[in-house]
Amino acid sequence: MEYTHIVQYYETDRMGITHHSNYIRWMEEARIDFLSQIGWDYAKLEEMGIISPVLNVNCDYKISTTFSDHVQISVKVKEFKGVKLHLAYEMKNEEGKTVCKASSSHAFLNREGRPIRMKDEQPELYKVLSDLAAE
C-alpha cells in the first residue's frame, strides 16, 4: 500500500531540510491510510473497542527531504502473529530514491489495555493481516 506526503514548510529546520522527527509522523499518517485501504479504518477499530499503541519505532535515514518534496511511503506487513503487528515502511522521493527505511510495532488491546486475541475476537481482521504478512 502506498501513501504520498508533501513536505510542509513547518516540517523543515533552519538548514531547510526536514526535521527527523517528522518521518515518524509520516509513518503514522501512512499507517492510518494503510488501515483504511485494507478496509479497517482506525476510527472503525476504535468504535469496536480496539486500540493499537506503538511499541517500537525504528528509522534509518538515507537522503534528506526539503519543503514541497513529494514523499511516497509504502507500507507492508512485516510480521503478524495475532497480538503484535510489525510494519515496514520505505519512503522514496520523486526520483525514486529511498530517503528513509523504517519499521514500527503495534499491539492490539481492548479499552482496558489488555491484549486482544485477534484470531478469536476479530477473525476477519486477523485473516486480512495474516494474508498480508504472508505476501
Image (cartoon, grey):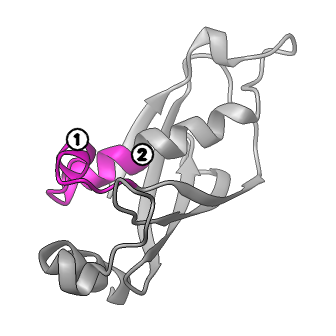
Q: Quadrant of the C terminus?
A: bottom left
What residue is shown with label 1? 43
Residue 85 located within the stretch drawn in magenta: no
**Residue farthest to the right, as pictured:** 15
- Say which quarter of the image contains residue 5: top left
Q: Quadrant of the N terminus?
A: bottom left
**How dense is the environment of label 1, judged by Cα within 10 Å: few (below 14), some, or many (20 and up)?**
some
Residue type pointed to by label 1: Ala
> Whole-Å distance between the Cαs marked 2 and 1?
15 Å
What is the x, y in percent for residue 120? 20, 86
Decide if residue 114 is on the left or right side of residue 8. Answer: left
What is the x, y in percent for residue 40? 19, 56
Q: Is residue 66 above or below residue 81?
A: above
**How dense is the environment of label 2, judged by Cα within 10 Å: few (below 14), some, or many (20 and up)?**
many
Question: What residue range appears in magenta?
Answer: 31-51
Tell me what residue is drawn at x 56 percent, y 50 percent. Answer: 91
Q: Is residue 86 above or below residue 47?
A: below
Tell me what residue is drawn at x 43 percent, y 67 percent. Answer: 114
Residue type pointed to by label 2: Ala
The residue nearer to you, when weighing 63 against 61, is 61
**Element at badge 1?**
helix
What is the x, y in percent for residue 115? 42, 72
Q: Which mark is residue 30?
A: 2
Residue 2 seen anywhere in this rendered image of the structure: yes
What is the x, y in percent for residue 96? 54, 50
Tell me what residue is drawn at x 27 percent, y 46 percent. Answer: 42
Decide if residue 121 is on the left or right side of residue 103. Answer: left
